[in-house]
Image: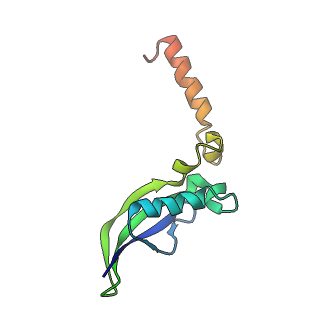
Amino acid sequence: MAKFRVYSIFDDKAETYGPPVFYPNKSVAMRSFSDTVRNPDSMLYRHPADFRLYELGVFCDATGTFDCYEKHLFICHATTFVLDHQNIDDLFADDDFGTLQDDLDEIEKDKATGVIS
């Protein structure tokens, strides 16, 4: 008898969860998720700011039953796996808040003028 954890990728733009996938533990789920995020042919690679991995529950292969969690467990954000090879500003290019560099520049300016320490 084995118990598999049930995972799903949430798409912020579509506001939906993808089809469930089954892994023996969180480490294996994260490895698979990171492989998909790092694949230049995947949508997750092109839009990493839009995707998050969640654990939804447990599946028992002996009984064929699911034990769904009352609240989904957040595992990680797709951006966790792309910072080493993509410009961070590109990750959030669609937001209305400007770029990360703009924010960092503003913080440095405030520090220099004594607005913040």
Residue that protrudes farthest toward the top in the picture: 113
- Image colouring: rainbow
Is 115 rendered above or below residue 74?
above
Q: Residue at image x 59%, y 57%?
A: 37
- Taking 24 as reference, is 103 above or below it? above
**Depth check: 23 or 42 in front?**
23
Q: Nearer the viewer, residue 60 or 17?
A: 60
State the residue at coordinates (66%, 44%): 90
- Name which residue lies at 46% across and 16% down: 115
Relative height, residue 110 to residue 1 (above, below): above
Farthest residue to the front: give it.
1
Q: Residue 99 at what x, y percent from top left?
A: 62, 37
Quarter in which the N terminus is drawn:
bottom left
Q: Residue at x 69, y 57 (%)?
A: 40
Locate residue 116, reporting x and y percent. Answer: 44, 18
Task: Point out the residue furthest to the bottom here.
Answer: 63
Circle count: 0
Q: What is the x, y in percent for residue 113?
A: 52, 12
x then y, percent, for residue 21:
47, 73
Q: Is 24 left or right of 44, judged from the image as shown? A: left
Placement of the C terminus among the 4 image quadrants: top left
Left or right position of 59 against 88: left
